[in-house]
Image: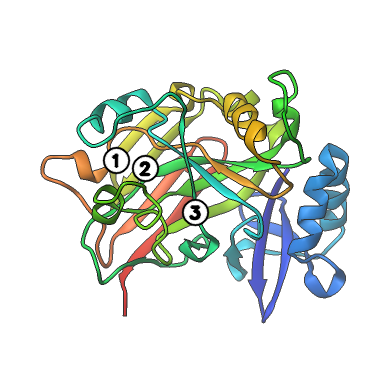
Amino acid sequence: MRIVRFFKDGKQGYGLLANDADITVRTEDEGFGPASFVEALAGGEAGLANFAVALQAGPSIPLDSVDLATPVPLTGKLICIGANFGKHAAEAESVFTPGKHATFFLRVADGVVSPGAPLIKPKLSNAFDYEGELAVIIGTAGRHISVENALDHVAGYSIFQDGSIRDYQLEAPQWTLGKNFHATASLGPAFISADELPAGAKGLRLQTRLNGELVQDASLSDMLVDVVAAITTLSSVMTLEPGDVIAMGTPAGVGFFRKPQLFMKDGDLCEVEIERIGVLRNRVIDEA
């Protein structure tokens, strides 16, 4: 199933993609707000199936008649993995030394915008870099999840653009500031249930384009820490809960390590595409 969250006429709701152009919808005044989707995620496959059946019973409207929101409401955790593709880790070796454990960090909801919404290049920096990533959406909660059961806790997938302010990221002992500027990341366009994709999304192709130019191109099979390993590692530290998002890291080709460097600026169009998931598009504007 393919599900979107949207705003229309001052209301939000959820829609089930019937095809590439139409969605069947239910709105928050019918009980289909963000909390209802998180509840469906918590219910596992049966919860999602029931949610989809209810959406299917709603009226059909054109997809382009709504404003898309992030598929999940970002009321839970947003956990990211750094340097998780071998070639990207290699290009970053001058500024990053891997440790015994994988590099995880958190992003806050204030830094994430919806599909189609503008990414904001901050006043404080010109080093606004793109990062296309797979987003893993957690369904049923778990702690100390085994390798064998890890994918049972994945409700589905989406796309994340982990926009990074490189000088603030790399000129500090840890990455929090550079990874959390207001409205520098995005998530969407849709939630794709796990049963529609290969296990762990392995083998799918990720591409990032800036103004139509291909700048990143890799297989998700190239991730050093795959979805199973990310879930087992994180759940050994914290409880993973319905609606949590794990952003799985970006491949080589980021702007900081290009010669000359390539950063996003006002008017640019950033597109992240993952096959069988979709395309996440956002324009860049200068901070007012």
* Residue receiving disc 2: 208
Q: Secondary structure at mark 3?
A: loop
Q: Is residue 232 above or below residue 51?
A: above
Q: Quadrant of residue 136?
A: top right
Q: CA distance from mark 3 to mark 1?
A: 26 Å
Along the line of sight, the residue nearer the viewer: 213 or 87: 87
Q: Amino acid at mark 2?
A: Thr
Inter-mark Cα distance, 1 to 2: 6 Å
x then y, percent, for residue 103: 44, 35
Residue for point 37% across, 49% down: 175
Q: Residues within 10 Å of mark 2 (few under 14, many from 20)?
A: many
Q: How is the image coloured?
A: rainbow
- Whether residues under marks 1 and 2 lie with C-beta atoms below 8 angstroms apart, the answer is yes
Which part of the image, by quadrant, shows the N terminus? top right
Q: Is residue 202 left or right of residue 93?
A: right
Q: Residues within 10 Å of mark 3 (few under 14, many from 20)?
A: many
Q: Which residue is mark 1?
A: 214
Q: Nearer the viewer, mark 3 or mark 2?
A: 3
Q: Quadrant of the C terminus?
A: bottom left
Lateral position of residue 56 relative to residue 183, left or right:
right
Residue 12 % position (x, y): 70, 71
- The image shows residue 157, relative to residue 211, as above or below, that is above
Residue at the location (33% across, 46% down)? 209
Q: Secondary structure at mark 2?
A: strand
- Mark identifier at residue 107: 3
Left or right, 110 with respect to 131, comes to: right
